[in-house]
Amino acid sequence: MKIKYFQTFLILGLCLLSQSANSEYNARQSEVARRGAEVMPFSLAKTLHQFTKTADGGVQKVIARDPTDQEQIVLIRQHLRQLAQKFSVGDYSGPASIHGADMPGLAQLKQASPAQLKIVYADDPAGASLTFTAADSRFIPAVHAWFDAQLHDHGHDAVEMHRLHHPSQP
């Protein structure tokens, strides 16, 4: 009988713990979405962030959920062009204001010189992308950690892609 009570309390405790974790996770995503609206000119709900880790860095792509939504596509392209310029000189103030200054990988990325971490902007039919290529292998884990943090914080507005979706990449 005592074992049955213990099992019941254990299950109840795990359920409460899970609900608390989900509540914190949802609160975090709501806060990130609120801050994101102050930094990103496009609609988070009308776009999708895609992250692909590669052997030498990764690709961050933002696309309009509706590939015919020219307003969102123009806004995505303008924003990612600006980010490419800023990131190339170590300015990650936009992501820091959205995700927090202690965002994983951010401190390392800010230290990378253009020779150590190349960031290339490219148009995509439904948006744009930034390709991060680390000439210095110390920055690859930072790019990957930074992608993971964004995936976590953006929830259903972000997706992890795999190299199978980008056959032209090494």
Image (cartoon, grey):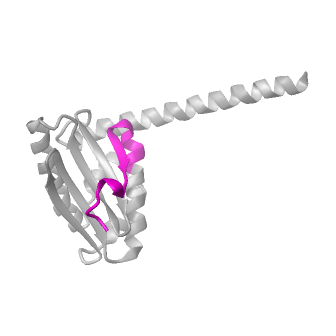
Name the image quarter holding the C terminus. Answer: bottom left
x and y, in percent, of residue 142 in the image: 40, 64
Q: Is residue 75 left or right of residue 168?
A: left
Left/right placement of residue 1 relative to residue 6 reads: right
Q: Is residue 158 magenta?
A: yes
User: Which quadrant of the figure has residue 40?
Assistant: top left
| Location of residue 106 in the rendering, given as x and y in whole percent from the top left corner | 37, 60
Residue at x-position 41% and y-position 51%: 149
Answer whether residue 41 is magenta in the image. no
Q: Is residue 105 visible?
A: no
Query: Who's the residue at 31% across and 77% down the image?
Result: 135
Front residue of 72/35: it is: 72
Whether 130 is drawn above or below 44: the answer is below
Considering only vertical position in the picture, is 126 above or below 59? above
* Residue 7 appears in the picture as rendered: yes
Residue at 9% from the left image edge and 44% from the top image edge: 74
Instruction: Please identify the quarter of the rendering in which residue 70 is found.
Output: top left
Residue located at (91% from left, 21% from top):
1
| Residue numbers of the magenta segment | 150-170
